[in-house]
Amino acid sequence: MTSDGIEFELTRKRVKNINLRIHPPDGRVTVSAPLRTSEARIAVFVAAKADWIRHHQARIAAQPPRPELRYVTGEEHRFLGAVHVLELRRATGRVGAEVVEAAAAPPRLVVHARDPHDATEVQRHLERLQRRELQRRLDVLVPEWEERLGVRTTRIRIRAMKRKWGACRTRTGDIVFNRSLAAEPPRAVEYLVLHELAHLIEPSHGPRFQAILTEHMPDWRAVETALNGRVTTR
């Protein structure tokens, strides 16, 4: 659909409010709306936000493109919210990736691979390290925020996601987190945990949902903006 020159993808869901998202890296706009909301009302909603949408699309367009990763020694990778230098070694025993820190040097991601020149193998070891690190964080954060919010999840999963940092199935309590969150600072991971668990109280992104976030994390908008500016998705 198009409204006031803004093209957007519309999805109808069992939600209470109309929600809008702008997705890097191309500024794509998606809108989710309640099942019975008229297209005319949705168009008015988007038109009212047209200036805000164009502003954020311009910000996204002005960001330099991410360099394509080659998985070679010396390459910089984001991990745990900081830049780590990749170091490849030929495995003499067990294969895998680890974080190595030294007082007088930047932290390193050391990968022990059967073939250090095989980018696919190196990437696989790094992704497993991401999953382990994110799971370690979630094992602490999810129970803590369940207690604070008075909710319970039924299952927590981690997987590669192209268009979202996380997703919550409110009817089942099943929550999925993007594996790439392992690259982000602890505050960002904590925000995503709060965000997804808050959906167990309020399924939409409307005023009630935002009030829950503000009550428990007053700076959530700044954290979300930083995530949206880096990503994949949201």
Image (cartoon, grey):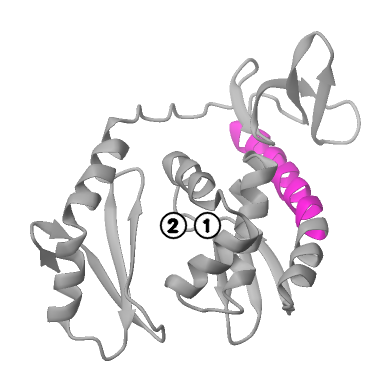
Q: What residue is drawn where x is 36% and y is 46%?
A: 24
Q: Is mark 2 on a helix, strand or loop?
A: loop
In the depicted structure, whether residue 28 falls above or below residue 182: below
Specify start and end residues of the magenta stretch as a single range: 119-139
CA distance for labels 2 and 1:
6 Å
Residue 86 position, x and y percent, is 67, 22
Total marks placed: 2
The residue that mark 1 highlights is: 161
> Is residue 207 or residue 161 the one in the foreground?
207
Q: What residue is drawn where x is 89% and y is 26%?
A: 92
Residue 201 position, x and y percent, is 60, 79
Amino acid at the residue labelled 2: Arg
Q: What residue is drawn where x is 21% and y is 59%?
A: 49
In the depicted structure, whether residue 90 falls above or below residue 203: above
Which quadrant of the view contains residue 138?
bottom right
Where does the N terminus fall, quadrant-wise? bottom left
> Is residue 70 or residue 4 the one in the foreground?
4
The residue that mark 2 highlights is: 163
Which quadrant of the view contains residue 64?
top left
